[in-house]
Amino acid sequence: MIARIWRGVVRAEETGEYVDYVRETGIEHYRSTTGNLGAWILHRPIGDRTEILTFSLWEDIDAVRAFAGDDPSHAVYYPEDDRFLVERSDTVDHYDVD
């Protein structure tokens, strides 16, 4: 099993709107991909900003590729992400889960 974690930062006042947006785009996309075992949004306040993490579990790296493309280390973005994100990681972290 593989865990996939992505990180980004939004302005605190846009947290709720961005969480809703990620739920409707990324999380829905994760969950509808064959081999996905679950996906969640984590967030925490840091001063006047909010750190956002998406955490998903996958059967194997091939399932991750079905979601992310040939290079699963690249982050997947959606049209409105540019409007919200003040910091973002263009890569994601993958961990083996035992």
Image: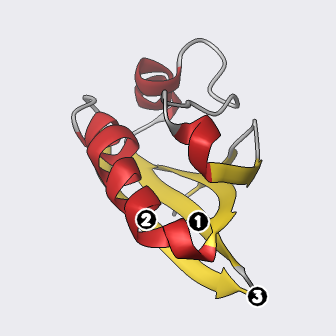
For the residues labelled 2 and 1, the Cα–Cα distance comes to: 7 Å
Residue 1 x %, y %: 45, 49
Residue that label 1 marks = 52
Q: Is residue 92 visible?
A: yes
Residue 66 x %, y %: 41, 19
Which amino acid, by three-letter code, is at mark 2? Ile
Task: Return the disc, 2 or 1, that comes first in the chain's sequence.
Answer: 2
Local packing at callout 3 (Cα closer than 10 Å; few below 14, some 14-19, many 20+) is few
Task: Return the disc, 1 or 3, that comes first in the chain's sequence.
Answer: 3
Q: Secondary structure at mark 2?
A: strand
The relative height of residue 34 versus residue 38 in the rendered view (above or below) is above
Residue 23 x %, y %: 31, 53
Q: Is residue 9 left or right of residue 77?
A: right
Residue that label 3 marks = 47
Q: Is residue 95 visible?
A: no
- Decide: marks 2, 1 in contact (CB < 8 A)? yes
Residue that label 2 marks = 41
Between 96 and 28, which is closer to the camera in this rendering?
28
Residue placed at 40% from the left, 61% from the top? 17
For the residues labelled 2 and 3, the Cα–Cα distance comes to: 19 Å
Q: Quadrant location of residue 89?
A: top right
Task: Return the disc, 2 or 3, that comes first in the chain's sequence.
Answer: 2
Residue placed at 21% from the left, 34% from the top? 32
Residue placed at 45% from the left, 58% from the top? 18
Between 85 and 88, which is closer to the camera in this rendering?
85
- Decide: marks 1, 3 in contact (CB < 8 A)? no
The relative height of residue 15 versus residue 83 in the rendered view (above or below) is below
Residue placed at 42% from the left, 25% from the top? 67
For the residues labelled 1 and 3, the Cα–Cα distance comes to: 13 Å
Which amino acid, by three-letter code, is at mark 1? Ile
